[in-house]
């Protein structure tokens, strides 16, 4: 086994850097490519590296790679400068095989972090406080295999809720993780979307006109940055002026010019976007620039007059499985064109 993640793989998804902690803890060494640039802004891995050093690792940067070594990690108290999700998860996995107890302070509180805690506990680690800002991990000499059904994706669910609201549909969303979606549900309800629980499913309707909103993205439990682009499309259809402030990433309005090509009226000033609605969207050829921007353009295409062609949908595939098939099953005229230009 070569404990290495080469650039050819890591460049395809920045989250690949999360193999660093598990490889180092399991094999005593790891060589993982630095993720490189990201379309939506700077996403440094300094918190990952500082935390691993606190656990006893020696870290070097060599020709674009993180080279880490430590015969056996040891538990430590780690104060994160910011509540990074991937940094928290990387350190959780490393600490699960460290000797002794690790305490993470200012940890990320996202549901995905809590889910990882449940999985590590099934494997034999002792994780307490996952989903809060202070977490303790009691490491083990080895971890065991496990069976686990992964929780439904709250961002995927939120995206389909926005699509239903934008089109004025009546959609039953099965296995919607409503308990993890409080901030998204609150924003949708403020806009006039009706969401009701039916067993393990959620029914989404939009009985009347959409109302404008004034929101800012925040770390969990605030409104998620991964829902910002989708909600912006819905704001384009609202009767009035909406304001969206992006506080997480500095370059996450790249969907704005593409929406403008479709007829949206949006002004941006740094981290703030002002959306004037309601807009009459027209179909156009648009370019997907990142995962959530892709989803927003698909939603815009669902409500636009005439045909919309979204290019570079390989971004979309990183977060949505067979999206066009699911939309078509709900009545949308959505197809994937093989061999379309990149």
Image (cartoon, helix red, strand yellow):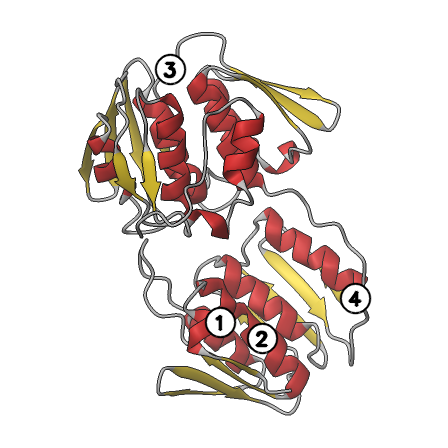
* 327, above or below 321, in the image: above
Label 4, residues with CA under 10 Å away: few <14, some 14-19, many ≥20: some
Which quadrant would the N terminus be assigned to in this image? bottom right
- Label located before the other in sequence (4 or 3): 4
Q: Secondary structure at mark 1?
A: helix
Q: Which mark is residue 21?
A: 2
- Please report contact status of discs 4 and 2: CB closer than 8 Å, yes or no: no
Label 1, residues with CA under 10 Å away: few <14, some 14-19, many ≥20: many
Residue 316 picture location, percent across and down:
44, 47
- Label located before the other in sequence (4 or 1): 1
Label 3, residues with CA under 10 Å away: few <14, some 14-19, many ≥20: many
- Please report contact status of discs 4 and 1: CB closer than 8 Å, yes or no: no
In this rendering, the label closer to the viewer, 2 or 1: 2
In this rendering, the label closer to the viewer, 3 or 1: 3
- Please report contact status of discs 2 and 1: CB closer than 8 Å, yes or no: yes
Q: Is residue 236 left or right of residue 318?
A: left
- Please report contact status of discs 3 and 1: CB closer than 8 Å, yes or no: no
- Label located before the other in sequence (3 or 1): 1
In the rendered image, which residue does mark 3 sit on?
211
Residue 33 picture location, percent across and down:
43, 78
Residue 196 in sight? yes
Q: CA distance from mark 3 to mark 1?
A: 41 Å
Q: CA distance from mark 2 to mark 3?
A: 45 Å
In the rendered image, which residue does mark 4 sit on?
123
- Label located before the other in sequence (2 or 1): 2
Figure quadrant of residue 89: bottom right
Q: CA distance from mark 4 to mark 2?
A: 16 Å
């Amino acid at each position: 086994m070569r404990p290495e993640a080469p650039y050819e793989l890591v460049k395809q998804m920045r989250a690949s850097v999360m193999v660093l902690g598990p490889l180092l803890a399991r094999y005593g060494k790891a060589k993982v490519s630095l993720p490189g640039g990201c379309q939506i802004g700077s996403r440094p891995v300094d918190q990952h590296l500082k935390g691993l050093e606190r656990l006893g690792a020696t870290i070097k940067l060599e020709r674009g790679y993180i080279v880490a070594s430590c015969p056996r990690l040891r538990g430590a108290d780690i104060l994160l400068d910011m509540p990074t999700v991937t940094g928290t998860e990387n350190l959780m996995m490393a600490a699960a095989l460290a000797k002794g107890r690790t305490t993470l302070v200012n940890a990320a509180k996202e549901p995905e972090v809590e889910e990882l805690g449940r999985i590590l506990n099934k494997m034999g680690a002792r994780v307490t406080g996952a989903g809060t800002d202070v977490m303790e991990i009691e490491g083990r000499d080895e971890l065991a295999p496990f069976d686990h059904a992964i929780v439904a994706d709250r961002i995927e669910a939120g995206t389909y809720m926005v699509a239903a609201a934008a089109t004025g549909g009546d959609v039953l969303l099965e296995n919607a993780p409503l308990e993890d979606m409080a901030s998204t549900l609150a924003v949708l309800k403020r806009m006039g979307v009706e969401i009701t629980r039916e067993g393990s499913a959620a029914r989404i309707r939009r009985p009347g006109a959409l109302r404008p909103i004034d929101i800012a993205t925040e770390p969990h439990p605030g409104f998620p940055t991964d829902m910002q682009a989708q909600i912006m499309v819905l704001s384009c259809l609202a009767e009035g002026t909406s304001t969206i402030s992006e506080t997480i990433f500095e370059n996450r309005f790249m969907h704005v010019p593409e929406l403008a090509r479709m007829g949206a009226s949006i002004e941006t000033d740094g981290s703030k976007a002002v959306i004037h609605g309601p807009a009459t969207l027209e179909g156009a050829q648009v370019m997907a620039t990142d995962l959530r921007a892709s989803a927003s353009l698909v939603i815009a295409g669902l409500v636009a007059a005439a045909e919309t062609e979204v290019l570079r949908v390989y971004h979309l595939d990183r977060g949505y499985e067979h999206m066009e098939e699911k939309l078509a099953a709900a009545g949308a005229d959505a197809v994937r064109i093989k061999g379309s230009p990149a």
